[in-house]
Image: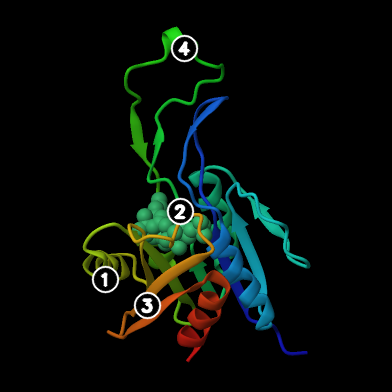
């Protein structure tokens, strides 16, 4: 029997807890990452999906590793990375977490004026540093200004094969929308505009371009 290719996808936000009732996060719905995981399944990949907390329906036939924090996502991604032929890092990982995660709910009157934060590991950069020749590593760049310049910097710095730029300041795309507008940049200097489409069609186009 021919062994199936393996695709590892991350999706959704992470939550960085301040105390048991408060966290820092972002508006990622998981829709883009889930669309990529479904497209990978449709194309016959064995799929591992690592997902932050989202309100999406489970995908038939797919085991989803549920995580909350960036650190949990990092562990799950590292665990599944070695066997993956194609890695799509679509999750919106919090760059920082509070230094202290309080065990008990902080009283309103005792809540601090400012919260000390510490940087989370950059999961994608870590995967980039471990990448083997057989693996294709794809990241996303969510940008509000200088999109192309910033995306290309991330492509190089994180040792990616492709980066998908979404300029999230544009209306109706990116976080928590059914639509997105993506431009793909490759490490070989290719630029491919996929345009404005729903996330399912974009996932399909992304695979077409990346696998070409
Ligand atoms: O979930 P949806 O509502 O469908 O929205 C989709 C999306 C807008 C979240 C998605 O298309 C997207 O852009 N995902 C990446 C968001 C992001 O974190 O971008 P960034 O430019 O801050 O990070 C660059 C890359 O590094 C990303 O692939 C990110 O997953 C990765 N990263 C970032 C920080 C960190 N600590 N570890 C990481 O791996």
Residue 131 in view: no
Q: Residue 206 location in percent, x, y?
A: 48, 79
115 or 1: nearer the viewer: 115
Regarding mark 4 in the picture, which secondary structure is present there?
helix
Q: Label 4 neighbourhood size at 10 Å, few (<14), some (14-19), many (20+)?
A: few
Cβ of mark 2 under 8 A from ligand 1: yes
Q: Label 2 neighbourhood size at 10 Å, few (<14), some (14-19), many (20+)?
A: many
Which is more N-terminal, label 4 or label 3?
4
Q: Find the distance from the CA under tag 2 to the CA under tag 1.
A: 18 Å
Regarding mark 3 in the picture, which secondary structure is present there?
strand
Q: Residue at x 42, y 67 (%)?
A: 139
Residue 108 got which mark? 4
Q: Which residue is mark 2?
A: 92
Q: Are marks 1 and 4 in contact (CB under 8 Å)?
A: no
Q: Residue 180 location in percent, x, y?
A: 45, 67
Q: Are marks 2 and 1 in contact (CB under 8 Å)?
A: no
Regarding mark 2 in the picture, which secondary structure is present there?
loop
Q: Residue at x 40, y 78 (%)?
A: 195
Q: What count of labels does the image hold?
A: 4
Q: Is residue 154 above or below residue 16?
A: below
For marks 1 and 4, give the one nearer the viewer. 4
Q: Which residue is mark 1?
A: 152
Regarding mark 1 in the picture, which secondary structure is present there?
helix
Which is more N-terminal, label 1 or label 3?
1
Which is more N-terminal, label 4 or label 1?
4
For marks 2 and 4, give the one nearer the viewer. 4
Q: Which residue is mark 3?
A: 184
Describe residue 60's horizontal placement relative to residue 48 as left or right.
right
């Amino acid at each position: 029997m021919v062994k199936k290719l393996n695709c590892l996808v991350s999706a959704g936000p992470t939550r960085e807890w301040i105390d048991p009732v408060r966290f820092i996060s972002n508006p990622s719905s998981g829709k883009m990452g889930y669309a990529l995981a479904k497209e990978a399944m449709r194309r016959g990949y064995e799929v591992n999906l690592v997902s932050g907390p989202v309100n999406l329906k489970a995908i038939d036939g797919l085991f989803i590793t549920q995580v909350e924090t960036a650190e949990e996502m990092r562990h799950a991604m590292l665990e599944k990375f070695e066997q993956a032929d194609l890695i799509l890092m679509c999750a919106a990982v919090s760059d920082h977490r509070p230094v202290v995660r309080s065990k008990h709910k902080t009283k309103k009157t005792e809540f601090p004026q400012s919260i000390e934060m510490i940087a989370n590991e950059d999961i994608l950069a870590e995967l980039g540093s471990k990448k083997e020749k057989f693996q294709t590593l794809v990241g996303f760049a969510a940008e509000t200004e200088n999109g192309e310049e910033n995306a290309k910097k991330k492509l190089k710095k994180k040792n990616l094969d492709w980066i998908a730029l979404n300029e999230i300041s544009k209306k109706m795309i990116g976080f928590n929308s059914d639509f997105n507008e993506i431009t793909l940049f490759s490490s070989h200097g290719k630029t491919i505009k996929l345009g404005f489409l729903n996330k399912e069609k974009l996932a399909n186009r992304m695979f077409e371009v990346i696998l070409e």
